[in-house]
Image: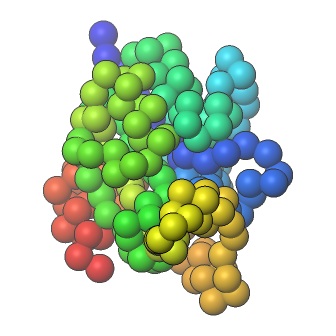
Amino acid sequence: MASDFWLIAGLGNPGSKYEGTRHNMGFMTADVLAERWSVNFSDHKGLAMLGKGVMNLSGRNVKFFLAKPLTYMNESGNAVASISAYYQIEPDHIVVIHDDMDLDFGRIKVKAGGSAGGHNGIKSIDRSLGTPKYARVRMGVGHAQRGAHAHDNTVNWVLGGFGPDQRKQLPEFLADGADAAETIIFDGLAKAQERFNGR
C-alpha cells in the first residue's frame, strides 16, 4: 500500500568542498525546510541523509521525509529510489529540488515530468524511478559561458560559488524554493506553478 508520506529530495554533492556551490541549491533549500519543520537528518543506508517531519499549514498536517542524497549528483536516483521503495512513496508524492542553468538566478519553475534539461541528477532519478512524473522545483542559477569550452565552463559554473550580490539574495531565494515545495504538497502542482512560474 502506498504511503501517505511525501518525499522531498534536495539535490547536491556531499562534502565541504561543494558547500555553497550552485549545484547544491537543493541541499541548501532542504536545510531551510529542515530548520522550518525541526527535521533532524540521519544516515539512510549510506545513500542519503534523511529526516522525517510533519508540516502544518492552514490547519492541515502532512508527514514527510526530507532527503539529501550522498551519492553525488549523477547518482541521485539511487538514493531517491531506495527511499521511495523502502517507505512505499509513489512518484506523485515526490518533490525534487535542484539547480537549473536554464533559469536566471532567483527564478523558480515548478513542473512535473518532461525533459531532464541536461541535468544529470534528474536523468538519474528518471532512470531509477522509471518515470519522470514527479514534481520538481527548478532553482535558477543562470548559465555558464557557451562557446568552445562550453562543457568545462558548465562544470566550473555549477561547482562555483555565488557572487556577493547573489549571496545577499540567497536566503530569500532559498526560502522561496522551500515555499514552492510546500505549495506543491498542500495546494497541488497547478497552484504552485501559478504562484511561482510567472515571477
How is colour applied across the structure in the image? Answer: rainbow
Residue sticking out furthest to the bottom:
165
Residue 118 spot, x, y in % from top left: 39, 49
**Residue drawn 31% across the image and 22% down it:** 130
* Residue 103 picture location, percent across and down: 38, 70
Q: Residue at x 71, y 22 (%)?
A: 46
Residue pushed farthest right?
A: 16
On the image, the x and y values in percent for residue 94 come to 37, 36
**Closer to the camera, 34 or 148?**
148
Q: Is residue 95 visible?
A: yes
Q: Image quarter for residue 14?
A: top right
Dividing the image into 4 quarters, which one contains the N terminus? top left
Q: Residue at image x 60%, y 82%?
A: 166
Q: The C terminus lies in which quarter of the figure? A: bottom left
Rendered location of residue 147, percent (x, y): 47, 71
Residue 52, quarter of picture: top right
Q: Nearer the viewer, residue 14 or 184?
A: 14
Residue 59 visible in this rendered orientation of the protein:
no
